[in-house]
Image: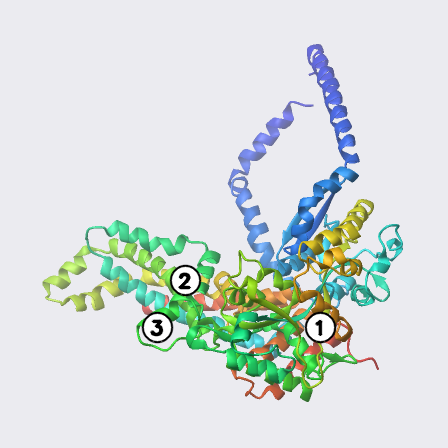
Amino acid sequence: MSAKKPLRVGQLIEKNIKWLFPLPTGVFIFLMMIFPVLYTFYVSLTDWDMISGGLISFIGLDNYINLLKDPRFFNAVKLTLYFTVLAVGVEVILGVFIALVLNRDFRGKNIVKLFLLLPMVATPVAIGLAWTLFYEPTIGLGNYGLKLLGLPPSQWLGSKAMVIPALALVDIWEWTPMITLIVLAGLASLPQESFEAAFVDGASRFQIIRYVTLPLLRPTILIALILRCIDALKTFDIIYVMTTGGPGFASETLNIYAYNLSFNYFRFGAASAALVALFTLVLACNLIVLWMRKTYEM
Amino acid sequence: MVTRKHSTQIIMITVLLVVVMSISMLTVGAARRRVTIRFVAANHPFTDVIKPLIPEFEKETGIRVDVENYEENQLTQKLTVEFTSGASTVDVFMTRPLQEGRLFYRNKWYHNLNQYLSAPGWDWADYPKSTVEAVTLNEDIYAIPIVTEWKTLFYRKDLFAKAGLKVPTTFEELEEAARRLHDPANDMYGIVLRGQRGAAVTQFSSFLYSHGGDFIKDGKCVIDSPEAVEAFKYYGRLLHDYGPPGVTNMSWPQAQALFASGKVAMWADASVLIAGIIDAEKSVVADQVGVAIFPAGPAGAKPFQVVPWSVAIAAQSKQKEAALEFLKWATSKTMAKTAQLGGLTMARNSVWNDPEIAKHIYPGLAESARLTGPIAVPYDRPLMTAVTEARDAIGEVIVTAIESGGKADLASLAKSAAAKVDVLLARAGEGPSK
């Protein structure tokens, strides 16, 4: 019960204040972000599974070697990349195009922006269910639309060839607006001088877009691209809700594959290895995009 | 620097604390006498029957029951995660013997029930032998069967009458009926069966057995036998030629919805699913549902009849006595009767022999149960621990069979599926004994 102690504590706090204040954040980041990644990596080196029911033992890289022997893994990597390239590719082109179209003053611009937000704020599971109905081959609107256009009906999610494009279309519907909004913000912040100079030099509208707007927008588009790539590579909800990876394994992306390994097959070691592979893939894709940015923006 | 004034204050505070704490201890003691158990159930008609009756049990015994229910796969996941953590508070749970029985048994998550079976009034002898076998591993009885289900053919009476068709009794007649009733231009499809990868396997099983095939023989997967390949071909052709579009994404909810909306003429699936197609609120064909015994293939009619659901006590439960009370109540004869009258097909013999209950069973259903019993195969999926992964491997062959109308090279696909299942068997120590 000495009266000195609180004083000492006070001094201690004051001395180390630059460590103390970020400490909660540091602890949080470690517990919630760094620890799970490290733990997943650790589990990926063990044979933890519920099927053999034995003790957990360290098996080195065996899980990774088995992964490389599993055709389902390569199928999953291929589908993940296919889905991402298709969805994000269309999203970026379409998103930038819509942003350029919207980038002028007209009545009801804010209402249009509001409508653009709607797909993004909807619940993914609800989106999945609504689109599943849309794609229903017998009573769905999708085939009704094709019929009106005089086209033959499609099996949509029921066909191995169509399922990834059909899922990508949902992603495109949901996330193109995000690119549009980011690009619109970017457009608003562009310096006017370059446009005036181009205009004075007699550049056509197309030339202005091609040689002034787009190059100036490149950093913005790259940011949008990175954000979308990370998300698209990890897409889980809509695929799980709409196909659970089917028909067969035709839409089993890496994330779905890892989910099956862990929560359906209870092979946690193997699932962690698949997740580390997904982590690497996401990282690699973003490093490539960043590298492109450095190289082309000299 | 403690003054006298301070010390009196401290004494007063201490006294106050002691008083407050002892009062709270007393209330804790009183609450402890009222036991609460946690019952984790599936989204299943049985849960719907039992839930409203739980207050009666609570009043009778003084045991409080907290009920949670989940979709079946989520239930398995939930239980696995909780039991793995070792900090589970689950006392009683619903479990699927064929799907997760071996997995949970192997991990010692079931409390052994052998010692309680002779409890007075429970009447263990009332359970048919096949249902008892379904919940027994190494002579340990780890759960109490609730319901049974068997492969049944549902058909549209009106369409059959209009076309002058009789109910199919062989696979040829089944295919012929599907062909005659298939009219996609008018949104009518001949037959629907499950086509979704893993989900299809249980319903494919009866076609497999009736072709003379099986999943596993002496610890080896025999899904690549010539009989099995014939079964894949038949199943694929039937659904490709006379099935609805998008069938490779269909499990029972989609198939049931399609039948209930009057768009298919026949549907073969588990008997329990009749509830959704004879309910006039959910089905536009509620008054036209015919129930038939599964038709015969080249090796005769071999429909499955299984115990899809049972109730067990968790090995980690700290309140096994209360859990046992609840288990006995939930699986009692009275409860079985209530559930049977509610449209379920219960495992106990007594509910089938009671003429009063028989009056309430849907026409044809009791008959199909009686005829299926003696010829039934007691499993509808490979009997192994890694059953989910095995189902996915076999299901892949089914999907390709449907997509190609049975024309793909199914023999070699079946061979690689069998090899995958063999690996799983070996990994779990269930391979061929030397």
Q: CA distance from mark 1 to mark 2?
A: 48 Å
Is residue B206 found left or right of A174 in the rendered image? right
Is residue B18 found left or right of A127 in the rendered image? right
Location of residue B94 (image quadrant): bottom right
First reached walking from the N terminus: tag 3 or tag 2: 3
**Of discs 1 and 2, which sits in the foreground?**
1
Location of residue B214 (image quadrant): bottom right
Give above or below for B30 relative to B103.
above
The answer to whether marks 1 and 2 mark residues whose Cβ atoms lie closer than 8 Å is no
Is residue B144 found left or right of B207 in the rendered image? right
Q: Identity of the amino acid at label 3?
A: Leu
Q: Nearer the viewer, residue A68 or B19?
A: B19
Q: Secondary structure at mark 1?
A: loop
Q: CA distance from mark 1 to mark 3?
A: 42 Å
Q: Identity of the amino acid at label 1?
A: Phe
Q: Badge 3: how crowded within 10 Å, few (<14), some, or many (20+)?
A: few
Q: Secondary structure at mark 3?
A: helix
